[in-house]
Amino acid sequence: MIISYGEILADMIGREQNGTVSYERYAGGAPFNVACAIARSGGNSGFIGSVGNDIIGKYLCGFAKNQELDFVDITILPDVNTTLAFVELAPDGERSFCFYRKSTADYMLSEKSLEYIKKADTVHIGSLMLSESKGIEFADKAVEETKKHGKRLSFDVNYRDDIFPDAAKAKKIYAKYAQAADIVKYSENELEMFTGEKGLGGIKKVSRPDKLICVTLGGNGSAYCIGDRVQIVPSIKVKPIDTTGAGDAFYGALLGKLDGKNFLLLSDAELNNIFRFANIAGALATTARGAISSLPEKEQIEILM
């Protein structure tokens, strides 16, 4: 069982027609996307988050209950609004974000929910909460409980410069969680930002013999590192429509495949197969709008293996 703590929000994805931009509402939030991707690709998954007592929050609660998750625990907070992310898409499907996130619900998580850690094999935490002191306080307690109960910790860097405009400050805050985690996901740009080296040049700077580093490479697939073991795993070619949540689809599929397995005991061939599966999940997730509506089922991925 993998449980994910963090933001659930509405992605408001823009569409321009005849000079007018309209926004379509989709469920999103990286940790929620990851939880759904785990379930969609055949894993056992639960999600814990918070929303406001508003029409967006009620929509998200209903949406989450209709997913294939083993459990959902979403706190509805009466005095704040649900977080929104406005998304603009380029012709190639790449997206840019603008968050509506002043005193909103996503980082106000209930400490009572830390009880779920006892039932988990892996605990996954998102990074958006780390921009707020309340979120940091919760993340610290989640890490403490995860270690206390001997569970595996997963962390997705998922850096957003409009949430963390001070990159140096973000690096300092993120470092504690990246170091504590057993599995960490970076994008190629994030790896360069946090190590100062281009491409995969810095991957061994953040690795350890007991740690799995995952790096998404866009259309080129992904890479992983365990100590001195470094492999690049290619993806499939697709025509992207919307890349929102593609990294989450990749990471959820990856975590689902690793659930119950000791990655230190897996051969390169076995890890390459798992990363290939995750790459295909991430690629297929770009072929439709929205982070969750586009998530592929396990059978769709396996056909392309």
Image (tube, helix red, strand yellow):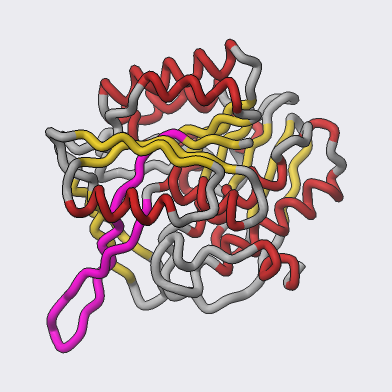
Name the residue nearer the viewer: 97 or 204. 97
- Identify the residue at image location x=75%, y=48%: 231
- Identify the residue at image location x=58%, y=11%: 148
**Left or right of residue 286, residue 18 in this image:** left
Please indicate, yes or no, whether residue 172 appears anywhere in the rendered image.
no
3 w.r.t. 114: above or below: below
Name the residue nearer the viewer: 220 or 264. 264
- Identify the residue at image location x=48%, y=24%: 177
Q: Main secondary structure of the magenta part?
A: strand
Q: Position of residue 225 (x, y in %)?
A: 70, 38
- Identify the residue at image location x=56%, y=19%: 146
**Left or right of residue 27, residue 207 in this image:** right
Quadrant in which residue 112 is drawn: top left
Name the residue nearer the viewer: 167 or 259. 259
106 w.r.t. 303: above or below: above
Q: State which region is magenta.
A: 5-28
Please indicate, yes or no, whether residue 78 appears anywhere in the rendered image.
yes
